[in-house]
């Protein structure tokens, strides 16, 4: 089975074709940033973007995605050559990682345990990319189906507002 994940066509074992997309991503491709939370589509920890729309990967059959473009939390950051600065996120393979502006905003407003973080970030990306000036109501509507067991909703709201400001000022 072929899936387009983070802009790359990936071969995934056919064993995953009838499994939820979450398992094809995590186990089949080794991209473990997408978290398993509840498994019944209620918490949002497994959120990915499919054609830029937030989608619960625990409830999406892998074979239903077709040619859809899947973006995981790993696909938000970009990698490129290191310029020699220690602040550029250099890794052992000699590439630098530049975080997505939404990831940067969530670092500014951290959460306690961060298990829900990938789902909230993916939801925030979809919201801010489609609406760079969200109202409080827009934010509440977007995050309504994403749970944070630690109760970090004020930090989440602040991070989304910071993301929107970053988008507008880019």
Image: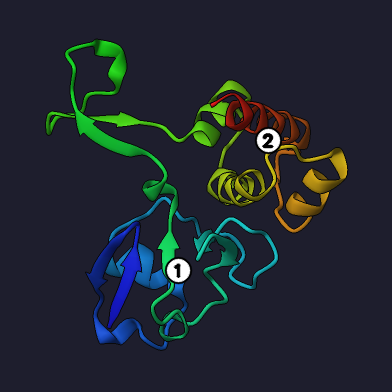
Quadrant of the image containing the N terminus: bottom left
Q: Nearer the viewer, residue 116 or 102?
A: 102
Task: Check the image and report above or below for 89 versus 48.
Answer: above
Q: Which residue is mark 1?
A: 22
Give percent across and percent down for residue 128. 64, 43
**N-term-proximal mark, 2 vs 1:** 1
Q: Which mark is residue 160?
A: 2
Q: Is residue 127 left or right of residue 108?
A: right
Category of crowding for the residue at label 2, using alpha-carbon neighbours closer than 10 angstroms: few (below 14), some (14–19), many (at least 20):
many
Q: Nearer the viewer, mark 2 or mark 1?
A: 2
The x, y position of residue 35, in whole percent, is 49, 56
**Residue found 60% across the figure and 46% down from its top:** 129
Which sits in the foreground, 50 or 157?
Answer: 50
The answer for how far apart the CA atoms under marks 2 and 1 are is 24 Å
Query: Image height check: is 101 above or below 142?
Result: above
Q: Is residue 82 above or below residue 152?
A: above
**SS of the residue under disc 2:** helix
**Element on which disc 1 rests:** helix
């Amino acid at each position: 089975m072929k899936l387009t994940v983070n802009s790359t066509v990936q071969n995934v074992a056919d064993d995953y074709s009838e499994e939820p997309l979450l398992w094809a991503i995590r186990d089949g491709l080794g991209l473990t940033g997408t978290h398993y939370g509840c498994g019944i589509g209620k918490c949002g920890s497994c959120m990915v973007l499919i054609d830029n729309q937030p989608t619960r990967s625990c409830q999406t059959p892998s074979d239903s995605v077709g040619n859809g473009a899947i973006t995981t939390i790993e696909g938000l950051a970009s990698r490129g050559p290191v310029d020699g600065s220690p602040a550029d996120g250099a890794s052992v393979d000699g590439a630098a990682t530049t975080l997505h502006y939404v990831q940067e905003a969530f670092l500014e407003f951290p959460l306690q345990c961060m298990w829900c973080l990938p789902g909230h970030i993916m939801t925030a990306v979809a919201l801010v990319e489609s609406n760079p000036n969200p109202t409080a109501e827009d934010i509440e509507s977007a995050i309504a189906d994403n749970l944070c067991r630690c109760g970090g909703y004020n930090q989440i709201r602040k991070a989304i507002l910071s993301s929107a400001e970053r988008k507008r000022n880019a």
